[in-house]
Amino acid sequence: MDLLTILQLLAGMGILIVGAELLVRGASRLAISFGISPLVVGLTVVAYGTSAPELAVSLQSTLMGKADIAVGNIVGSNIFNVLFILGLSALITPLVVAKQLIRFDVPIMIGVSILALVMGYDGNVGPWEGGALVFGAIVYTTWLIVQSRRQRASELAEDKETPARTPLAVNILLVLAGLGLLVLGANWLVEGAVAVARTVGVSELIIGLTIVAAGTSLPEIATSVVASIRGERDIAVGNVVGSNIFNLLFVLGGAALFTPSGIVVPASVNGFDMPVMLAVAVACLPIFFHEGSINRWEGGVFFAYYLAYTLYLVLNATQHDMLPLYSDIMMRFVLPITVLTIGVVTFRFARARPT
């Protein structure tokens, strides 16, 4: 690793932090300007904006015939967003989860995860399937904005108090500047990280599932962490859920739609990584049920599971001697305990609900 690569990685990280701060500040003010709730801004403007690197990388990789990187980037980013980013954000400060997320957006995230798994089961997501996913993204976004404006108008009518506003042009400039810096910083980090990975001979699929996925998710990390610190918790959680929905509907759909033969889904992704992505999405519901929040210990569990998942990928890629033992421990002990814990939390929530 040369000095230029190290400087590129450090500069990219610094640019990401500045970009995240500008984006969160501008987005939270836009919520007031347009009469949209901070949660919906997190689910749309912030989530879609911070997913721009995933879209750019996946489209470019598909057009270059690097389908492994494209699919690995999408699936790996969704796993990374929930386990790593939500986990890290909750470790910093417990996150309050809005009821809308529990009742509507997380079930949609689970639904589109199932849809992506079904579409990719035959090893290919075709152009018409990609078009259907993109159409779904448009419908979902439109519904969110319309519903939020109605709810916000009702709240303001009852409140009778005019919230303080900053000039619209300033807020838009902050958002655009933040997005631009996030994309630039993420690109620098990804380029440096991929160069290092290829130096040590890691496969393109593993690069997509780990380094590229983490690199293109760095805007989400920076944005959610900064939002948590600033107290914009709706934006922090909405950013992750919205990004996952956007990645599957718009990024996967767009990559398939604009590629004549569709996007190829490797058998290993169908057999392991997509089911993990779905399991992670399903695991959100019972954890979100718990008092409508993500506590520090739950964040720690998410974070630990991401480390365990990454370790499995590394052991599998290198065919390490520890792989059989590690897989056996995960299948016999860790996964059953996780399923049991999720079941207990869900059961308690169901019993606690008023009839």
Image (cartoon, rainbow, N blue to C red):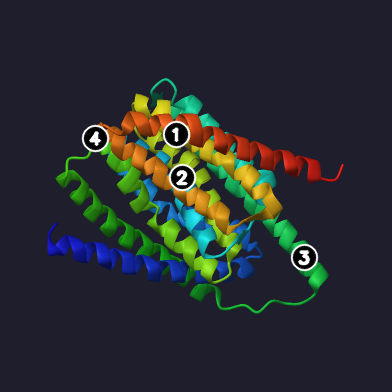
Q: Choose the circle earlier in sequence order: 1 or 3.
A: 3
Residue 22 placed where, x, y %? 45, 71
Q: Considering only order in the chain, which callout, 2 or 4, is on the residue closer to the N terminus?
A: 2
Instruction: Identify the residue shown where x is 33% and y is 58%.
Output: 186
Residue drawn at x 73%, y 57% is 150
Name which residue type carries label 3. Glu
Between disc 1 and disc 2, the foreground one is 1
Task: Name the residue carrying label 3.
Answer: 155
- Picture quarter with the N terminus: bottom left
Name the disc covering residue 330, or none: 1
Q: Is residue 337 visible?
A: yes
Q: Which of marks 3 and 2 is nearer the N terminus?
A: 3
Disc 1, SS: helix
Viewer-nearest of labels 3 and 4? 4
Q: Residues within 10 Å of mark 2 (few under 14, many from 20)?
A: some
Near mark 1 (Cα within 10 A), the count class, few <14, some 14-19 or many ≥20, is some
In the rendered structure, the answer to whether residue 127 lies left or right of residue 242 reads: left
Query: What type is the residue that disc 4 sits on?
Result: Thr
Q: Mark 4 points at which residue?
A: 318
For the residues labelled 3 and 2, the Cα–Cα distance comes to 40 Å
Say what amino acid the circle numbered 1 marks.
Answer: Met
What whole-number distance in Å separates the C-alpha atoms at marks 4 and 2?
A: 20 Å
**Residue at the disc numbered 2:** 305
Q: Distance between the residues labelled 1 and 2?
A: 11 Å
Residue furthest to the right: 355
Q: How far apart are marks 3 and 4 (CA)?
A: 56 Å
Residue at 74 percent across and 63 percent down: it is 153
For the residues carrying marks 3 and 2, which lies nearer the camera in this image? 2
Label whose residue precedes the other's in the sequence (1 or 2): 2
* Disc 4 packing (10 Å; few <14; some 14–19; many ≥20): few
